[in-house]
Structure formats: structure tokens, C-alpha cells
Amino acid sequence: MCSACDTPAPTSARLTVRQAASEERGTHREQREHVAALHGLLVSNALVTWTAGNVSERVPGEDLFVIKGSGVDYNGLTWEGITVCTLDGTAVDGVRAPSSDTDAHAYVYRNMPDVNGQVHTHSTYAAAWAARAEPVPCVLTAMADEFGGPIPIGPFALIGDDSIGRGIVETLSGHRSPAVFMQNHGVFTIGKSARAAVKAAVMAEDVARTVHISRQLGEPVPIAQADIDALYERYQNVYGQK
């Protein structure tokens, strides 16, 4: 959940998304436990403050996803703090009202079928770039590896409906980057799994910080596009244990 995003919008659709399911039936418990544990990586990598931020993941083979409850504390977060929702954002299991970003996540899952995980944070350096509405230029090999180019800026969007999701889809469709910095807001990442989206969020903050520091020393040197392409291809298809 986004702590700055908790002001209820005066629409019936918004109120529906904010509802919890009528009871806790414990469905998809293993996946909910996995997603709850991933939130610990947001804390250990200093990407979140208080209860801000969230991780979600698509339920394989079903038109469902699981997402952190709105305003749920990271300390002691368990599977019961994760709510199961349909792809229209309706809570169907869990007694916690789902994140105020639920509509945005749902929109992305509906419109980007290859996306199976999403993360939202307000990490400091990445949010600073978002506040300036400036893409992070690809001046590090680590950026070429993970993002395949600059990290783009998405449009300004109000919180509480699917506007943010629309901006994410509009910006990242056809883009190699798994991260977008939404203007005046923060970081949204996508991935083939929730863990992959968490990795993208960690890497996004790391390179946002490094490029910021580099600019204090002078103008960073850009990487040629052909080299970016070669680095991206190697990292995505050769690096690591395949």
C-alpha cells in the first residue's frame, strides 16, 4: 500500500476495491506466505518507510492475484496480511482491505499478460528522479543489463483508481525496462514473478542513487546504444545459471 495514497476517493468503485472479503478462507496460503516474505526484502533494502509500498503476484492459472493489505505493518507481516483479489480488483479472500494500489495492479495484470509480479515503493533516490520527471539515463553497465536502456518516467496520475495502472501500461508496453518512475510519485516495477519485480525495484533504487551521485561530480558518460543492446542480451540470456 502507498501511505500517501490512502485518501478515499468518493466513488463507489473505489469503496468496492477497499473492501475486504467477508471471511478468511485461507486460499492460496502458500503463495500468500511467499509474497508476505518478499516484503521483507523491501525493508532490508531500505526501499520503504512505515507501511508504504506493496508487492503483488498473479495466481497461476486463475484470474486472481494476491496483494498486501492497505496500511498493514511490515513488522510481523504474515500470509493473513495478504489479500486475494480478482483481476477487476475485488477482494475474494482475506479480511484485510487490499492495498489502495489494487486497481492499478489489476489493470496491469489485465493488460500485460506476461506480467506475473508487481512492486511499488517510494524509495528515496528513485522518487527524487520521479519528482523531477526525469528519466534516469543509461550510463552504467548494470542499467544496460537490467533495464536495457534508461528508466522511463510515467505520467502523473492520482491514486485510488486504475489511472496509475494505465500510465504503467502506456509507458512500459514495448519497453525493455521493468521499472517506471511515475511522475511526482514513485517506483513501479513489473516482472515474470513477484521476486523478479522486487529485484527490479532494488536495482532501480541502486542505479538512481549512483547516477545521482555521478552527476554531482560532472556529466555522466552515456553508453552507446549498440553496447547497451549487447550488454542486455548477454545479461538476459547468458549470465547466471541457466
Image (tube, rainbow, N blue to C red):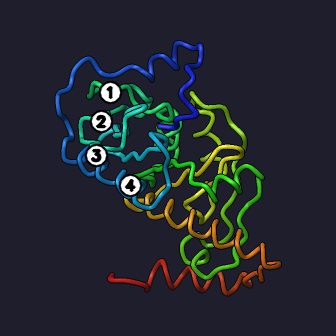
CA–CA distance in space, label 3 to label 2: 22 Å
State the SS at label 1: loop
Which residue corresponds to the image point at 52% horizontal and 18% vertical from the top-left? Answer: 13
Q: Earlier in the sequence, mark 3 or mark 2?
A: 3
For disc 3, the marked residue is 61
Residue 15 in the image, given as x and y percentages of width and height: 48, 16
The residue indicated by pointer 4 is: 194
For residue 158, above or below residue 78: above
Residue farthest right in this picture: 219
Numbered tag placed on residue 81 in the rendering: 2
The one nearer the camera, 165 or 4, is 4
Q: Which tag is nearer the camera, tag 3 or tag 4?
A: 4
Q: Evaluate if marks 2 and 1 touch, with contact meaning CB atoms under 8 Å apart.
A: yes
Instruction: State which tag comes first along the sequence, 4 or 1.
Output: 1
Nearer the observer, disc 4 or disc 2? 2
The dot on residue 96 is: 1
Q: Secondary structure at mark 2?
A: helix
* Mark 4 or 2, nearer chain start: 2
* Residue type pointed to by label 3: Gly
Mark-to-mark CA distance, 2 and 1? 6 Å
